[in-house]
Image: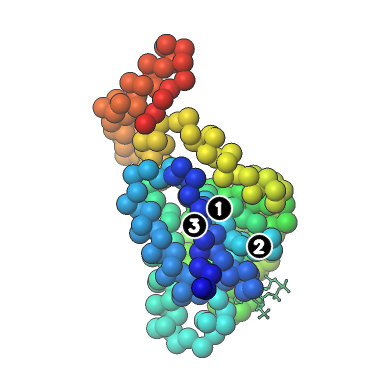
Amino acid sequence: MSESLIEVRDNAGIVRLTINRPKALNALNSEVIAELERLLVDLEGRDDLRAVLITGAGEKAFVAGADITEMRGKSPQQARDFAGQALRTIKRLETLPVPVVALVNGFCLGGGCELALACDWAVASDNAIFGQPEVQLGVIPGFGGTQRLPRRVGPAMALDLVTTGRKIDAAEALRIGLVNRVMTQDELEAYADELAGQLGGNGPQAVRSAKQAVHDGLDQDLDSALALENSLFALCFACEEQTEGMGAFVEKRKPNFR
Ligand code: CAA
């Protein structure tokens, strides 16, 4: 039986997706993207979902980019369709209603960096290398990099990276805010458990609402965004989670969120 292109592990609603093409440094071809989209459609419908982690197989690469071998002979229309499929899939990942975290375990280049940018945050192993080297191939980032990178690290740093194509190490990625934390490969491996521990005690609906407030608010002016937060805050008081969470505090016990 052939190995799946994306491995799925599920630990009580913390779902870990591993892109599994290590011989091609987990490069994203149409098959991987289609498989990822299929999995994300399934995850979108799951009420028990708590978080999604995405990583690459092996110790060398998260994702070394879109598949150059596949892209090489494409016409402009085929390139548009290929990138369109990826943009749609990456958007699905970004808009999952739970925290989505990139575990960057090595090369994170081109389409790989664009995949990581669509995650709510990224943690990296100390050997990770980041970059948008597309200009060195005579193209530009096509999976959202020209838009999400400046929103994450600011336009000047994004322009530095997308016009030079230079690669940066994990320490620089941390300094510019591309990743939240840097750890060893072993620690990265254990991060799913750490996250399960951190999220496990929180109200699942509150976590979803917190993500929604941040994401939806970023697309609005501050006054509208604050009104959105106010509505979502009020909505919490219509949920059992608020009764349980605040009740537990007053009764000096741990909350038991269902
Ligand atoms: N597409 C297809 N295959 C890739 C690949 C990619 N993006 N990156 C690596 N591979 C393949 C290599 O061709 C090689 O395959 P073979 O063994 O069959 O020759 C295998 O993975 C191992 O790679 P290397 O031998 O090159 O490993 P290395 O350690 O010498 O170098 C690397 C590692 C610096 C990451 C180098 O592989 C590299 O530069 N890769 C390309 C990075 C890149 O340019 N990414 C951007 C792609 S364009 C893009 O993503 C556009 C977009 O936004 C949509």
Measure the alpha-carbon separation of dots 1 and 2: 15 Å
Name which of mark 3 and mark 1 comes first in the sequence: 3
Measure the alpha-carbon separation of dots 3 and 1: 14 Å
Residue 76, position in %: x, y? 43, 84
Mark nearest the camera among 3 and 1 is: 3
What is the crowding at mark 1: few (fewer than 14 residues within 10 Å), some, or many (at least 20)?
many
Judging depth in this view, the residue of 38 and 171 nearest the camera is 38
The residue drawn where x is 42% and y is 11% is 251
Residue that label 2 marks: 58
The residue drawn where x is 35% and y is 53% is 44
Name which of mark 2 and mark 3 comes first in the sequence: 3
Q: Quadrant of residue 220?
A: top left
Residue that label 3 marks: 8
Instruction: Identify the amino acid type marked 2.
Output: Gly
Residue 182, position in %: x, y? 68, 47
Residue 43, position in %: x, y? 38, 53
**Secondary structure beneath disc 3?**
strand
Q: Residue furthest left?
A: 238
Q: Is residue 243 visible?
A: yes
Measure the alpha-carbon separation of dots 2 and 3: 15 Å
Instruction: Identify the amino acid type marked 1.
Output: Ala
